Image (cartoon, helix red, strand yellow):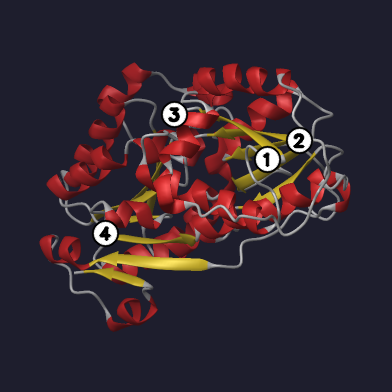
Amino acid sequence: MRRRDFIAGLGSTVAWPVMAHAQQSDRVRKVGVLIGGDENDPEAKARFSEFLKELTELGWTDGRNLQIDIRWARANADRARMYAKELVALQPDVLLAQATAPTAALQQETKTIPIVFVGVSDPVGAAWFAGLPRPAENITGLLNLDVSMGGKWLQLLLEIAPGIKRAAAMFHPDAGTASYYTAADAGTAPYYTAAMFHHDPGPASYYIPSFEAAARSLDVEPITVPVQSDAEIEAAITSLGREPRGGLVVMPDSGFMLARRAQIIRLAARNKVPAVYNDSIYVKDGGLLSYGTNRADITRRSASLVDRILKVEKPTNVPVQAPVNFQMALNARTANALGLTVPQSILLLADEVIQ
């Protein structure tokens, strides 16, 4: 989907002002956007509309003093790389990347065009730059979640399902490190422990240490589950549900895992596996419990970074920002179907409870 079709499809979600708050310049500026998700996902479109609305508040209107070109990677690494090349070839004034894979794809294509990322967990670990206060020459943005969240998700899993004795952290490994296991392995032994990794397990390595540390302190067996296909997701969750007292933590992934949330939620329900997620969209679609960054908020806030760079501020002078708005969501219907009694502590903390 291209820029005009998408923005027209937003309909009334964006109210364009008659007059901008400030005249930026006579020259039309260009913004290239690479999103990891699918343009047919209503939640993804709604979140991106927050970025567009905030840009409008800052005085930038598409079709007047701004040209926005959008590409949707649809959780496909090859598509992300192809669209990264397309967007860089357009020579925009700034690039916006939602999620780690699109950011990495753009970062590989240009070291000069400014890049603003949204929802990346570990840019230092990705070797994009050495430290958060001083970003690289052409890249800055907004972080997704703190490294300690892996342990937090496990704690919440045990809080809502106290009988858990085995907990699996499920994730999609980075494409560059996927060679440490094969699809054939997943058919017979879908569970992998940290000791079995021959390479770093990609973005999940940021959260797995705190997940495993929390598991040891809570007397829970930690299991790491890399999945790269629908069949592997089904094999992993089915195996987890064969024995009682198994639980699941779905690691952050705004591409592959998010695109397969319907399958994950359905399999968790069928196999009676309590699951915790990082994004409330899972809970709205039937998942049990989520805790994480308010994704709409960080998408909205990214507009202020784009605005600063459009006004010719260097990315090195725009420090990486941490999330400030977190939310917990609970699906009480799912808890009831799993036979769980939701503790008062979670009911009091939940920002949204689906009855």
Q: Position of residue 19 (x, y in %)?
A: 67, 56
Residue at the spot x=61%, y=67% of the render?
324
Dot in front, 2 or 3: 2
Q: Is residue 88 visible?
A: yes
Q: First in sequence, mark 4 or 2: give its number.
A: 2
As measured in the structure, the alpha-carbon distance from the residue carrying label 2 to the one carrying label 1 is 7 Å
Dot in front, 4 or 2: 2
Above or below residue 202? Residue 79 is above
As measured in the structure, the alpha-carbon distance from the residue carrying label 4 to the one carrying label 2 is 46 Å
- What amino acid is found at the position of numbered circle 2 in the picture? Val
Residue at the spot x=49%, y=38% of the render?
7
Tag 1: Cα neighbours inside 10 Å, few (<14), some, or many (≥20)? few
Which of the 4 quarters of the picture holds residue 233? top left
- What amino acid is found at the position of numbered circle 3 in the picture? Arg
Q: Are marks 2 and 1 in contact (CB under 8 Å)?
A: yes
Q: First in sequence, mark 4 or 1: give its number.
A: 1
Q: Are marks 3 and 4 in contact (CB under 8 Å)?
A: no
Dot in front, 4 or 1: 1
- What amino acid is found at the position of numbered circle 4 in the picture? Leu
Residue at the spot x=73%, y=47% of the render?
306
Dot in front, 3 or 1: 1
Which of the 4 quarters of the picture holds residue 125? top right
- What amino acid is found at the position of numbered circle 1 in the picture? Arg
Residue 64 is marked as 1
Above or below residue 133? Residue 188 is above
Q: Is residue 57 left or right of residue 109?
A: left
Q: Which residue is mark 4?
A: 288
Q: Is residue 220 left or right of residue 343?
A: right
Q: Is residue 137 left or right of residue 126?
A: right
As measured in the structure, the alpha-carbon distance from the residue carrying label 3 to the one carrying label 4 is 25 Å
Q: First in sequence, mark 2 or 1: give its number.
A: 2
Q: Secondary structure at mark 4?
A: loop
